[in-house]
Amino acid sequence: MDVLCTDKTGTLTENRLTLAQARPIAARSADELLRLAAMASDPATQDPIDMAILASANTQGSEYRGADRLGFEPFDPATRYAVGHYRDVGRELWVAKGAPSAICALIAQPPEIAALSEELAAGGNRVLAVASGPSRDGLTMAGLITLDDPPRADSADLVAGLQALGVRVIMVTGDNAATARHVAAQVGIDG
């Protein structure tokens, strides 16, 4: 064997996502942003991202259960977002959560978040955008959240051992390049 291609999540990392940051943009607070992110999540999907957001919302007391859910579209790899539709305090509320570029495409006049998104991803975290509004066509950027998935304790030693045997190790991931570079460096993968 000359080359080993390995998945990042759950192979090189622990696959235990936790909320790292909530950076409000239009949301009034980090708690409000977390509440909105939870409303665009669904425990029935058992998606690790949704489960991490819901666990954080439960731990931090961000009450998201008071709204009546009218509809939910789970995360779709083709669109790269999930959407929740609610009646909240007597009015309709739409909430979307997903890849920053995909969420920006849903907003009529999205704010410039590329630099902030890249900065947050450079720390090795997965970055998600959250948008909300009174209609699906009337979304505004609520903010960005980051999720941390630390490398497994044995990953760096395993990569070093394979490299000592002459095997080139390549990490494969759907995360953005900044996140991938950070995690790769932590486990000793160059390039």
Image (cartoon, helix red, strand yellow):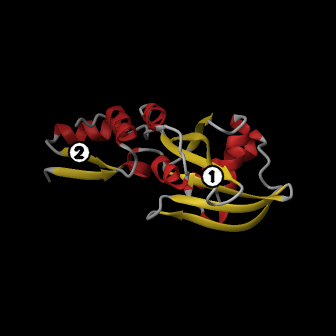
User: Please, what secondary structure does the residue beneath circle 1 have?
Assistant: loop
Above-or-below relation of 60 to 175: above
Give the farthest residue toward the right.
90
User: Please, what secondary structure does the residue beneath circle 2 have?
Assistant: strand
Give the labeled residue for mark 2. 169
49 on left or right of 163: right
Q: Nearer the viewer, residue 96 or 6?
A: 96
Quarter holding residue 57 = top right
188 on left or right of 104: left
Quarter containing the C terminus = top left
Q: Residue at x 25, y 46 (%)?
A: 170
Q: Is residue 68 visible?
A: yes
Q: Residue at x 25, y 52 (%)?
A: 5
Give the labeled residue for mark 1. 139
Amino acid type assigned to the residue bearing label 1 in the image: Leu
| x, y percent for residue 135 | 68, 59
Above-or-below relation of 46 to 171: below
Label 1 neighbourhood size at 10 Å, few (<14), some (14-19), many (20+)? many
| x, y percent for residue 51 | 62, 54
Q: Is residue 54 visible?
A: no
